Image (cartoon, rainbow, N blue to C red):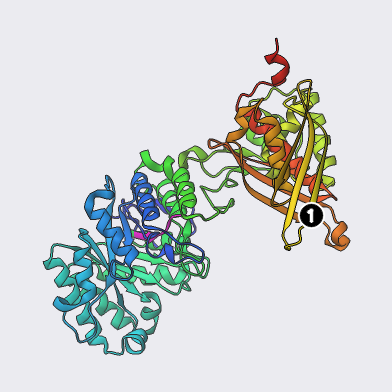
Amino acid sequence: MARSSAIGVGWNMSFELNVPSRVEIFDTTLRDGSQAEGLSLTVADKLRVAEQLDMLGVHYIEGGWPGANPKDKEFFARAAAGDLVLGQSRLVAFGSTRKAHGRAETDPVLADLIEARTGFVCLVAKSAPWHVKETLRTTTTEALDMVADSVAYLRNNGREVLVDAEHFFDGYREDPGFARDFLRVVEESGAAAVLCDTNGGTLPKQVERIVAEAREIVSGHLGVHFHNDSGCAVANSIVAVCQGADHVQGCINGYGERTGNADLTSIIPDLSLKLGVETIGAERMALLTPVARHIAEIVNMVPSPHQPFVGVSAFAHKAGIHTSAIARAPSAYSHIDPEAVGNNTRFVISEMSGRSSVLLKAEEMGLELGAEDASHVVERLKELEHRGYHFEVADGSLELLMREATGWKQSFFRMESHRVVTDLREDGTFMTEARIKVYIGDERVLEVAEGNGPVNALDAALRKALSPRHPEIDRIHLTDFKVRVLDSSLGTGAVTRVLIDSTDGDRTWTTIGVSDNVIEASWQALSDSFVYGLLHAGATEHGVQRSRH
């Protein structure tokens, strides 16, 4: 099972490595992860997340606690009825051991676990004496009997069992003797023990010692489950594997209560790409980024751009010296090949960029930019970012700026003027009306539209003007609108920065506007968004003029 300690050469670790050749990945996003503040899943969401996890190839998917709420009960019922078909993963139902001084055969929680009809069950049990006495209000002897009885009952009903040893690391420090007895009972009962850092406060050095000592007792599978309250959940998981743990629990994107659970999107590549440990299989590693982002969309949580391995900024380079080096040697400033985890290298353009950075970004966009054009872009970037523009977060506007440096000028429409009026009505409601005059080809078009605010009204009026000539506009939708005051000391007269996120269903992009007039800043970002969308939709420029010939 163990690997050679040669894996650790150069690590400067104080302990001897006992790395297993294979580690089971247990995802608890649908149970522990769903306890994250702001995260709420429907049954349909849970089924979709499980499908993504199965596609990634995790070994276990913990679906929830079937007796805890109607949602989880329905999830397991639908999974059993065939609404969830897993090809790689095994579905796990979660619950607790029998009650103190009760009987496993009549315990309602264990009955719910049997009814869930999963082949695997994960039980939570108190492994710290303080929690046994204060939370369960019973003795340590009874706590061990609760584990043994519950595991035996489930195994007699054809279930494979894992036991989450709650508060194990705190309990081990409190009473190592009881913790060792707990592990012996779990193994003798035929279950796999999972050491849980429930409060998330254990540090790697403590994990190193405790897992090593636990491995001397446990001969079968030994799992770990870390929370991130001290910022060490991923590091603790890696250290635990180096001491012989061969089962790691965590959540995609590190979701979970408080500061979250150990992030599997870091643990999996750390183990497989850094330590050479088999996890989800080399052929599935490139699915890591798309699955992480897809699940973020399903659970409606904005992913962190700076998330290791899978974040959009994980392999982004901004400083000119870095991008120059990467042009010559792609691995110069990347610890792995981004494509190994399904991500990609990005060159971020800002006032810090040099000509080489601009040329690399142009190549990434598929634009032909000469050296003189690139120099012009650099100077233009410095000028605009001094005024408050921020192009590294506005990829759509950046591309239009770079195209303009080559002499291109959009001709989908040309603004003559726009006016926005907001009226306070007698009933206390507001009505906003936008009036725009634009040229589309050589035709002058006037349109008026109402909206719930200035930006909504301008958006509606421009759509009315463009839609008959450019039907592609109907696919373009605003998904987010952000306003930032750049100098609050100027009060209501401050310069504002507006960012608009848009999509056409296939791609997403961001555009920017900056002005001391928030409506003008909004118009800049809005019009850029429409131009970018039409450009990539393949819309014909000079649409009306060409249609007449």
Amino acid type indicated by mark 1: Asp
Badge 1 element: strand
Check if residue 512 falls in the magenta segment: no
Q: Quadrant of the N terminus?
A: bottom left
Residue pushed farthest left? 156
Left or right of residue 160, residue 40 in this image: right
The span picked out in magenta is: 248-252
Q: Determine which quarter of the picture holds residue 320.
A: top right
Q: Determine which quarter of the picture holds residue 26.
A: bottom left
Residue pushed farthest front? 426
Q: Quadrant of the C terminus?
A: top right
**Residue nearest the observer in this picture, 483 or 218:** 483
Left or right of residue 51, residue 362 in this image: right
Residue name at image x 19 percent, y 65 percent:
115
Q: Main secondary structure of the magenta part?
A: strand
Rendering coords of residue 290 (x, y %): 46, 43
**Residue nearest the observer in this picture, 336 or 367:** 367
Left or right of residue 482, residue 53 in this image: left
Task: Determine which residue is flagged by label 1.
Answer: 423
Vertical placement of residue 349 versus 92, above or below? above
Rendering coords of residue 143 (x, y %): 25, 83
Check if residue 251 falls in the magenta segment: yes
Q: Residues within 10 Å of mark 1 (few under 14, many from 20)?
A: few
